[in-house]
Amino acid sequence: MARARRSLRWLSLVVALGALACSEPAQPPLMVGVNTWVGYDPLVLARDREAIDALKVKVVELVSSAEAVRHLRNGLLDAAGLTLDEALRLVDSGFGVRIVALLDTSAGADMVVAAPRITSLQQLRGEAIAAEDATVATLMLERLLRKARLRQDDVTVVRMDATQHLTALLSDRVAAAVSYAPMNGPIQALGYRPIFDSREMPGQIVDVLVVRNEVLEERPEAVDALMGVWAAGLNVMQLDPQGAAASMAPGAELTPAQYQSVQQGLRFYSPAESLALLSGQPPLLAQQSSDMAQLLQELGLLREPPNWANLIDTGPAVRARDAQPLP
C-alpha cells in the first residue's frame, strides 16, 4: 500500500512538471522609459502611489529623452515618453514605433528669455542667443525669428546646455536664451524676462507615449495596462495636486510651489481628448501639427512628410474607453 502511495505521488509530480513544461514562460513587465520632466510625472506618480501592477508595467526614469530613444532602439524599452518631434524623427529614421496617446502640450512652459535691454523681438538682430542642441529649442528659435521677421544669419546661435544659460546671460556672452521651466526660474529672478513662449505655438510642443510595433502586436494586454497606469497617475495628479506636487517636487529638485508653477505652463490631455486628436482621416493631430512637421522638413530634420496612418495606433485608447463602466 505504501508503494502504491509513492507511485501515485510520483505520477502527480510527473504530471505537474509536464504541465509546467508545456506552459508559456511568464512575460516580463512592459518597460516604459521617461526622462525627468513634469509632463511624464503621472507615470512616476502612479508607480510611487502603487497604482500599478509591477508584474505588468515597470516605469524607468532616465537622464534624457536621447537615452530613452537609444534604449528603444536597443530593445531595452518597450515604450517611452517623447516629444512629438522626437517621435516623428524616430519613425522617419525607419524605426518602428507608434503613438498610442498624447500626454500634454506646452502652454508657456517653453520660452525665450532676454536681457532687460531687449524690449522688442527686432532688437535681437545682431545678438547672440543661447539654445540647447535639441529639436524643441530649434523649433522655438525658428518660430521666434519668423515672428521677428529675422533670418538665421541675423543672429548668432550659441549651442549650450540649459544649465549654462544663466552664466552666459550674466556675462553678456548672449542677450537671450531659449529656456524652459523650471530652468527659467533663476533667470527671471535676476531680471531677465520672457519675450516669446510656447503659447504662440499651440499644439506644436507635445509629449506623446510611443510603443514599439512588435509590442503592440504581441502584447496588447500589457499596452492596455500601460494606458491604465497613465490614466491612474493623471487622475491622482488632478484630484490631489498639492499631494502630487509634494511627492514629485523633490525628484525634480523643486519646492512643491515651484513644481505647481511649472505645471501651470502645461496642459494635460484627458484620455478622451487624446483619442479625439489621434482619430480621423487624417487625424486631427496631423492637421494641428502640419506646420511643425513642415518646419522640421525645411530644417532638414525630417526626410519625408509623416505618414500618420502608420504613425498612430488608436487601438489601446479605444479599448481603454470601451472598458470604462457605464454611468
Image (cartoon, helix red, strand yellow):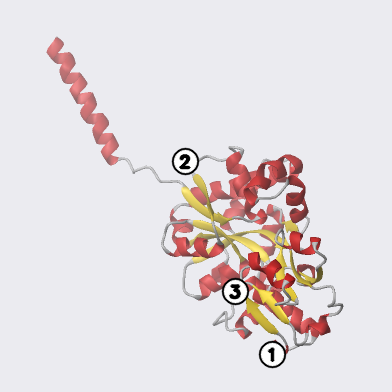
* Residue 175 location, quadrant: bottom right
Where's residue 268, x and y in %?
Answer: 72, 55
Drawn side of residue 316 relative to residue 38, left or right: left
Instruction: Look at the image and tell me whether residue 324 can be seen.
Output: no
Query: Which mark's residue is nearer the viewer, 2 or 1?
Result: 1
Q: CA distance from mark 3 to mark 2?
A: 37 Å
Task: Report the residue that reaches farthest toward the top.
Answer: 1
Q: CA distance from mark 3 to mark 1?
A: 17 Å
Element assignment for label 3: loop
Crowdedness of circle 2 by 10 Å Cα count: few (<14), some, many (20+)? few
Residue at screen point 84% across, 73% down: 116
Please name the residue that numbered disc 3 is placed on.
133
Q: Say which amino acid is labelled 3.
A: Asp
Please name the residue that numbered disc 1 is placed on.
153
Q: Say which amino acid is labelled 1.
A: Asp
Element assignment for label 1: helix
Q: Nearer the viewer, residue 167 or 79?
A: 167
Where's residue 22, x and y in %?
Answer: 28, 40
* Residue 145 location, quadrant: bottom right
Residue at screen point 63% across, 54% down: 40
Query: Which mark's residue is nearer the viewer, 3 or 2?
Result: 3
Q: Say which amino acid is labelled 2.
A: Leu
Q: Residue 55: give its label.
A: 2
